[in-house]
Image: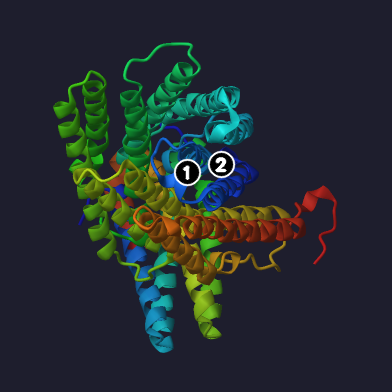
């Protein structure tokens, strides 16, 4: 188990990337039952990640550095965008619209990537720097979330 | 203390800034194609033909230059947390000056006369200067993405050298200064432009976006850290040797750099083949074609093929194709992103924002790639079978026409939805 918040959260980003790629593979394969399962897995992973940030990491960071509320607010807003894309994706799977699935997955992928590059490049290093001594406790709570 | 740059949408430029660069650029590639279609095989007889010089600058400054500037203004805040200062002013001035410069310079080179050449070259140089100065400030402040930033910084430096050498050539052409062995200085200008600016730009973009777009493994650390600075130092050494008449040294170093780019192309193709996202989308097709063109250009150089072939492969194969492929993703994504924010501001959650697939048709993007490939094949073929030159020009113009029509389609959808998503506090009742 890692002892770094940045590594832990970045690993979770990568897990989501892999799950999204698996969804695309399922669309290409044309197996709708499998796709529905993959999409469910992806949504669960994404929402779980947002919860970790919104319920544990962001409040802790803002508590020690109040000026972080701007960036975390921005990140939370982008979470809302991704939540709505994930819902849209489930609808498209429901109507078996392969083109829409691919278009939404492409959009979701790019939103996730630019979002992650900001978190990994700026926010997580900021968290590591400011939350130093609380790291073990926060990691425990992130894993429990 | 850590900056929070890049985490605020306020720091991303308004969408009309990058969009105006993207919507103008294809016109210059269309112009280059039409020039070839009208002049026919004579344009490609040698790189000294007025038409060839004009077409090269239409593509390099008008097409590639505009797309690069538009993309960097957009990308720096997001990727590196480095917003460009006074972005609206910088964007407007750069766009205007580069557009005038590319058109004037090309017209002058094609036979419009020396005053058009220096007005065009002057405007283009001023356009790049207006762009490079604030971008240098942003790049100096930027953090994160070290491999990309290194390559972008070296590419910016190579662009500055290319422009300076270009101005030197214009001054010599006007008789303002005397340059011994003029040809060697032209070679140096082309080497800095094609290997330095275009080459390193491709490296910087590849390191950043391929892993991001396609979930490929990252480029090996030595490539990220050493390739761009090594190329820059190499071009510096090789061009100094070349200008001083040390032919053997110059050729040996240029050869090593070419070999380096072939290596880079192979690594890129290998990474693409190991990607996790399975789709072979039109952007990826353009990456394939561009990397193979890059290898082709290096081979052509190694076998002392005509410089026109190298120019065609680098300028059209890499320089026209790759940016088109990138725009297939960039403009739809930006559109979606800005519409999303308008939706938040307007509270119109009953409207569903069109996703990227419905903003730009992947099928038509494939058609664009097909036309591009046809243009490239015809262009290369025309160097041996001259009768192919006019069809090559038409194909080049057509592929860029399809590109601009697709981009205009995205812009129209943006306008349509933006009108529906007026901010709630504006007092204007949105029509549905």
Image check: B136 left or right of B19? left
At horizontal 56% and vertical 79% (from top left) the residue drawn is A91
Name above or below for residue B195 compared with residue A82. Answer: above
Q: Nearer the viewer, residue B176 or B3?
A: B176
Name above or below for residue B312 compared with residue B82. Answer: below
Quarter of the rendering occupied by the N terminus of chain B: top left
Q: Nearer the viewer, residue B40 or B307?
A: B40
Residue A92 sits in quarter: bottom right
Q: Return the x and y of residue B100 as percentages of the image width and height.
A: 62, 33
Neighbour class for label 2 at 10 Å: few (<14), some, many (≥20)?
many
Image check: B30 left or right of A31? right
For mark 2, name the chain. Answer: B
Marks 1,2: beta carbons within 8 A: yes
Which label was assigned to residue B364?
none
Where does label 2 land, which residue?
Answer: B12
At horizontal 54% and vertical 36% (from top left) the residue drawn is B110
At horizontal 41% and vertical 86% (from top left) the residue drawn is A30
Quarter of the rendering occupied by the C terminus of chain B: bottom right
**Labels 1 and 2 share a subunit:** yes
Q: CA distance from mark 1 to mark 2?
A: 7 Å
Q: Return the x and y of residue B425 as percentages of the image width and height.
A: 79, 49
Q: Is residue A54 visible?
A: no
Specify the farthest residue to the top: B177
Where does label 1 land, which residue?
Answer: B78
Residue B315 sits in quarter: top left
Helix, strand or loop status at disc 2: loop
Helix, strand or loop status at disc 1: helix
For mark 1, name the chain. Answer: B
Q: Earlier in the sequence, mark 1 or mark 2?
A: 2
Q: Nearer the viewer, residue A123 or B393?
A: B393
């Amino acid at each position: 188990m890692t002892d770094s918040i940045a590594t832990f959260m970045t690993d979770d980003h990568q897990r989501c990337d892999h799950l999204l790629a698996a969804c695309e593979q399922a669309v290409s394969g044309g197996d709708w039952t499998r796709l529905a399962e993959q999409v469910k897995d992806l949504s669960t992973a994404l929402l779980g990640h947002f919860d970790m940030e919104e319920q544990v990491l962001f409040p802790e960071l803002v508590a020690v550095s109040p000026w972080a509320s701007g960036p975390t607010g921005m990140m939370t807003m982008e979470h809302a965008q991704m939540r709505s894309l994930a819902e849209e994706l489930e609808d498209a799977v429901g109507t078996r619209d392969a083109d829409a699935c691919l278009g939404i997955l492409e959009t979701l992928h790019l939103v996730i990537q630019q979002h992650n590059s900001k978190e990994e490049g700026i926010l997580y290093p900021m968290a590591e720097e400011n939350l130093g001594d609380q790291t073990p406790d926060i990691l425990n709570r992130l894993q429990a979330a | 203390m850590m900056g929070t740059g890049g985490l605020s949408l306020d720091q991303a430029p308004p969408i009309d800034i990058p969009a105006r660069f993207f919507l103008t650029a294809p016109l210059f590639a269309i112009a280059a194609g039409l020039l070839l279609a009208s002049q026919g095989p004579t344009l490609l007889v040698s790189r000294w033909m007025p038409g060839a010089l004009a077409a090269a600058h239409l593509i390099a400054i008008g097409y590639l230059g505009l797309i690069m500037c538009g993309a960097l203004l957009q990308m720096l805040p997001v990727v590196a947390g480095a917003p460009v200062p006074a972005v609206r002013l910088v964007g407007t001035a750069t766009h205007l000056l580069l557009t005038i410069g590319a058109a004037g310079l090309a017209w002058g080179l094609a036979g419009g006369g020396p005053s058009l050449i220096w007005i065009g070259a002057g405007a283009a140089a001023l356009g790049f200067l207006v762009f490079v100065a604030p971008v240098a400030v942003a790049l100096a402040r930027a953090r994160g993405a070290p491999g990309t930033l290194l390559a972008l910084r070296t590419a910016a430096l190579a662009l500055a050298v290319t422009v300076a050498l270009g101005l030197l050539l214009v001054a010599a052409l006007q008789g303002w200064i005397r340059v011994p062995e003029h040809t060697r200085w032209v070679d140096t200008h082309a080497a800095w432009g094609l290997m330095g600016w275009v080459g390193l730009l491709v490296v910087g973009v590849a390191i950043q976006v391929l892993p991001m777009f396609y979930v490929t493994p990252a480029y090996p650390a030595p490539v990220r850290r050493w390739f761009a600075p090594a190329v820059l130092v190499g071009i510096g050494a090789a061009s100094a040797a070349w200008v001083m008449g040390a032919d053997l040294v110059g050729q040996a170093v240029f050869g090593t750099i070419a070999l380096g780019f072939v290596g880079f192309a192979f690594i890129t193709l290998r990474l693409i083949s190991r990607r996790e996202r399975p789709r072979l989308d039109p952007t990826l097709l353009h990456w394939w074609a561009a990397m193979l063109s890059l290898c082709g250009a290096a081979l052509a150089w190694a076998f002392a093929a005509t410089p026109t072939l190298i120019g065609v492969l680098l300028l059209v194969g890499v320089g026209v194709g790759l940016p088109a492929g990138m725009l297939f993703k960039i403009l739809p994504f930006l559109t979606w992103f800005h519409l999303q924010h308008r939706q938040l501001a307007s509270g119109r959650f009953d409207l569903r924002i069109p996703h990227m697939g419905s903003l730009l048709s992947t099928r038509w993007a494939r058609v664009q790639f097909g036309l591009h490939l046809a243009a490239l094949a015809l262009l290369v073929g025309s160097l041996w079978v001259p009768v192919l030159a006019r069809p090559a020009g038409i194909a080049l113009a057509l592929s860029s026409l399809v590109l601009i029509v697709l981009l205009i389609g995205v812009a129209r959808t943006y306008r349509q939805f933006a009108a529906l998503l007026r901010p709630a506090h504006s007092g204007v009742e949105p029509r549905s």
